[in-house]
Image (cartoon, helix red, strand yellow):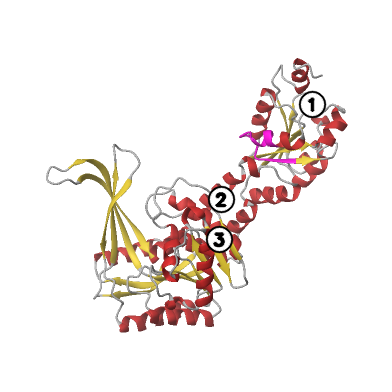
Amino acid sequence: MSADLIDLVQRLGQPRVLVIGDVMLDRYVWGDAERISQEAPVILLHADRREERLGGASSVATMLRALGARVSLAGVIGSDFDGGRTRQMLKDLDIDQEGIITDPSRPTTVKERFIGRAQSRHPQQMMRVDYELRQPVAASVETDLVELIAQQLRKADIVLISDYDKGVCTPAVLGGSIAEARQRGLRTLADPIRGRDYSRYRGCSVLTPNRLEAGLATGRVLQTNEEALEAASQLQQTLDLDASVVTLDKDGMALVHRDGRRQVFPTRPRQVYDITGAGDMVMSVLGMALAAGADYDSAIRLANIAGGLEVEKIGVATVTRDEILRDLLHSASTAGQKILDRERLCHEVESRRRLGQRLAFTNGCFDLLHAGHVQYLQEARLQGDLLVVGLNSDASVRALKGSGRPVNAQDARAMVVSALQAVDFVTIFDEATPLALIHLLRPDVLVKGADYRKEEVVGAAFVESSGGRVHLAPLREGYSTTRTLQRLGAA
């Protein structure tokens, strides 16, 4: 159900997140891939734009800032131009960099990507060039970094470890940081390296390897969801984790929890343009949600949404709360999720109201849907930001229209009405009138057909007394259910 995730997004707050890991700079060169070089069989890129973004652990920090967190970053950069550029970008984003050490013996890690467009169409990554040193940082740097991290932990609500295996997340650095975080009662989430030895992450709260990483770490080939759950279970037990979460790209995420929970959370199909940064986004949202008090189920479902939005963008990209909310609202309006009982509908409506949306409400039997109905519902939808249709149940229709009606059962009628783009939600009521439903929903606009006078509209006085209004929608001449049945010889 999307309403609970909408509520979660709205109460994420501004948690204080400490990100530990490999600070990087991502550089993108964009252009048109015009032709093959005459000098060698290679594509010529006619560059027209260069862009810089923070990468690695600093990408996680950037994503968290876009989501509204207060972020501190701990890591190592070089004493070079790229290191200075990284510090400036962090400053511009208001990311606390007191935990970053400048090491003159190492270059700042840079990943340069060349993005080409064929005939000005959708861009594709052509090549990546890495500038980096992968050896572990010196012992003196380790010591200084552990001390700085300990200071940063005093003002953190949660800790995220972004390990890209560039030499910063050594066993000493992680061991000291995880132990200190545990002592302070802080959760620690880690996005691990691709390797066989995960002992450096022992004691973390959550580990979030992808399918390949989890398989390598456990000596397994993960082709099925059950195999992913078995690998997650092995990691959870051997590393003393609260939970192990294996990301399964298009198949979602597998969770194994210390309390025995084992579940795969599917994700919606997406138009995937670039998977770069999807793991960072998943960990960022997991951290934000858990810091806001969410349980693992809700945190994973929200991370699935955010990860899906990220892969629809080129390169490592941020996702905002507004984008997540728009996606949740859109998914909630698909036909299969539009038909709600009163409890779920009230929850959904209240979530929308907190977003500042205005509710339009109308009701009817909608037995045989025709062009007049469609025009009427489109007019009703224009009166608010979302439209709820109260649908008379079969018993209610019989009481109003007689034993020969409805022609179509309530479930079929609800499905047809919910399939209309103008309709956001449908709920079925048994009463003779929708008055109880109107009192429950408190619509901002009550819509009925212009064949009624306002004083005849059920609920009009209540809506106006609550500050709402009544709208009488014009009807399309020549269309009615009774006339349609007469033409069919059924009445």
* Sequence-first disc among 2 and 3: 3
Tell me the amino acid under the disc marked 1. Tyr
Q: Is residue 423 magenta?
A: yes
Tell me the amino acid under the disc marked 3. Ile
Residue neighbourhood size for the residue with mark 1, other residues' Cα within 10 Å, grouped as few (<14), some (14–19), many (≥20): few
In the picture provided, is 55 more to the left or to the right than 251? left
The mark found on residue 300 in the picture is 3
Q: Nearer the viewer, mark 1 or mark 3?
A: 3
The mark found on residue 452 in the picture is 1
Residue neighbourhood size for the residue with mark 2, other residues' Cα within 10 Å, grouped as few (<14), some (14–19), many (≥20): many
Q: Please state which of residues 95 and 437 is positioned toward the viewer in this rendering.
A: 437
Q: CA distance from mark 2 to mark 1?
A: 37 Å
Q: Is residue 255 magenta?
A: no
Residue at 33% in and 46% down? 124
Q: Position of residue 1 (x, y in %)?
A: 64, 52
Q: CA distance from mark 2 to mark 3?
A: 16 Å
Q: CA distance from mark 1 to mark 3?
A: 49 Å
In the picture provided, is 323 more to the left or to the right than 385? left
Q: Position of residue 188 (x, y in %)?
A: 50, 73
